[in-house]
Structure formats: structure tokens, C-alpha cells
Image: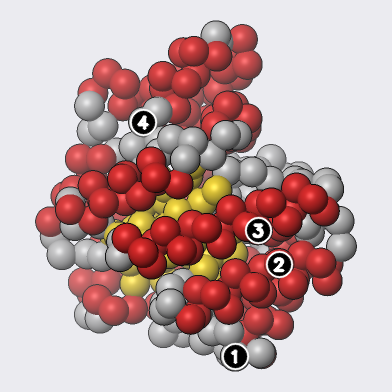
Amino acid sequence: MLNQLIAKTLPIVPKAIVRQVSNRYIAGETIQEAVTTMRRLNSAGAVGTIDVLGEFVDSRTQAEQETQMSSNVLEAIHTNQIQSGLSVKLTSLGLDIDDEFCYNNVRSLVAKAQGIKRFVRLDMENSPYTTKTINIYRRLHSEGLTNTGVVIQAYMRRSEDDIRGLAKEGASVRLCKGIYIEPETIAFRGREEVQENYKRLLRLLFDQDMYVGIATHDDVLLDFAQEEIAKRGVAKNRYEFQMLLGVREQKRDAIIKDGHKTRIYVPFGHDWYGYSVRRLKENPEVAGHIFKAMFTGGR
């Protein structure tokens, strides 16, 4: 209830206050700020993935600019030798404009990343884009661009079938709960049923020996994942934990201390306000984590 209240009141909160809160979990507006943040995280034992803020682009010019910015990020990662990959949202690269145009944009990024031995994660957006995103991943993979992977959202009812299909291709999967508001006909809505489906999907990913990014801040799921890893004896090169910048930092540090590879999602860019309001409205649980972090130092 508190989390939902925090999220719903964000649009009327003064922009300066939203900026102050967002500073915890957005690296800044420039590539250099993202690089500086990644260096700090690398020093703390974490790896990362950098994301240029922006989505639902509706002009070719803007999509080309977003593609160039992500290309610049790859150059900065390589030049500065930081331990990070790149995350991209396909709607920022033109998926709402033209499928082939978008594919050419993302292909150029994945090919460039392959040349410098870096990984590109195709973020998953809301349900109209799920099949298109998976198809673009498959096309890249079929062309030999295997330094990429997809995201599966545990609240989507289709996710088990998607994982079974992707297992045939040995896909790298980031498993998260999902943040978009979807109808109950296609998505689980209750907290516990989402948790239970996350557990089922994580077991399936381990069963299929797929590389898994365990993306959650939920203690129930973090504890379950660590228990499964220990019980199964999952090799450390077959999984990683993933968390958002600025959220549950003490928990993050404890996971790293326990010897688990941990990747931090590091967003940056000029669209910090839109991102902040959208994400916290869509995911009240994260709103609660960030609100508590303001007063507890990230515990």
C-alpha cells in the first residue's frame, strides 16, 4: 500500500525532489558519468550493463541518434576498459517505426560489440513487443551474432513456452518479474503468484543449463535462487545476479561477498525524469525500495 501510494504521488512531486531521489539509481546525463559510476561498481566487485535512457521513439532521426549514442557507449566501455555490457530497448532503436529499420540499427550495435568482445542485452518491453524482440534475437543469433541475449518476464503467462523455445538455441536469459501493467488474461498479477512463477522459471532455466541473469531485489527470490544454486551445484560461470543501480546496495554487497557474480543495471541520459516517473509508477515495489534507501543508506 505504501509503495503504491509513493508511486502514484510521484507526478505531483516537484521535479527537483524527483531528481534528488533519482540520483541514487541513474548515473547522470552523460556517458562520462556512466563510466565513472561503472568504475566505482567495478572497484566494489560488480560488473555492469549500461543503458541509454529512452524508449518508444517515433522518428527515424531520433532512433538514429539513439543508436549512435549506444554506439558511443560501446566505444567508451572499450576505451576505458570497464567491466560492462550494453542494454538496449528496441523501441528506442525504431521498433515502432519499421521492423527492418530497427533490426539494422540493433544489428550494427551487436556487431560492433562482438568486435570488442562485449555483450548486448535486448531489454524486454511490454507485451506488444515480446514476440518481435524474441524474433530479432533469433535473427541475430542465426547470423552468428551470439553476443546477445533476451529478457524473460516472470509475470507473463507465456514465459515458460518462451524459455523452452529459447533453450534450443542456448540463449542467455535475464529473468525478471516484469514491470509493465498487463491484463490478467496474459499476465499473473498477484505478488505471490508472480513469485511462484519466477521460481518455476528459474528451475526450468537451470534444468535446461541456460545462462541465467537472476534479476530481482526480492528476498524471497534471492534466497530461493541461492538455495537452488547450492543444492544443484550450479557452476559460477552459468549464472549471475542482477540488480538496479542504487537499490539494496548492502544486499548487493553481501551477494558479491558470498562469491556470486553480480551485474548492476546502470541507466543514464537526459530522459531521467520520464524514466523515473514511468518506472516508479509501473513498479511500486521499486518505488518502495528507493524511498527506503533514502532513509536507510541502501539496506
Label 3: few (<14), some (14–19) or many (≥20) C-alpha neighbours in 10 Å? many
User: Is residue 125 visible from the viewing direction of this image?
Assistant: no
- Is the C terminus in the top left, top right, bottom left or bottom right quadrant? top left
User: In the structure shown, which secondary structural element does the residue marked by tag 4 occupy?
Assistant: loop
Q: CA distance from mark 3 to mark 4?
A: 26 Å
Q: Residue at the location (65% across, 81% down)?
A: 140
Q: Are marks 3 and 2 in contact (CB under 8 Å)?
A: yes
Q: CA distance from mark 1 to mark 2?
A: 16 Å
Q: Are marks 4 and 1 in contact (CB under 8 Å)?
A: no
Q: Earlier in the sequence, mark 3 or mark 4?
A: 4
Q: Residue at the location (63% across, 16% down)?
A: 11
Outermost residue, right side:
98
Q: Residue at the location (38% across, 67% down)?
A: 78
Q: Which residue is mark 3?
A: 67
User: In the structure shown, which secondary structural element does the residue marked by tag 1 occupy?
Assistant: loop
Q: CA distance from mark 4 to mark 1?
A: 38 Å
Q: CA distance from mark 3 to mark 2?
A: 6 Å
Q: Earlier in the sequence, mark 4 or mark 1?
A: 4
Using the image as rendered, state which of residue 244 and residue 79 is in the foreground. Answer: 79
Label 4: few (<14), some (14–19) or many (≥20) C-alpha neighbours in 10 Å? some
Give amino acid for label 2.
Answer: Asn
Q: CA distance from mark 1 to mark 3?
A: 21 Å
Outermost residue, left side:
257
Q: Which residue is mark 4?
A: 24
Q: Earlier in the sequence, mark 1 or mark 2?
A: 2
User: Is residue 57 visible from the viewing direction of this image?
Assistant: yes
Give amino acid for label 4.
Answer: Arg
Q: Which residue is mark 2?
A: 105
Q: Which residue is mark 1?
A: 144
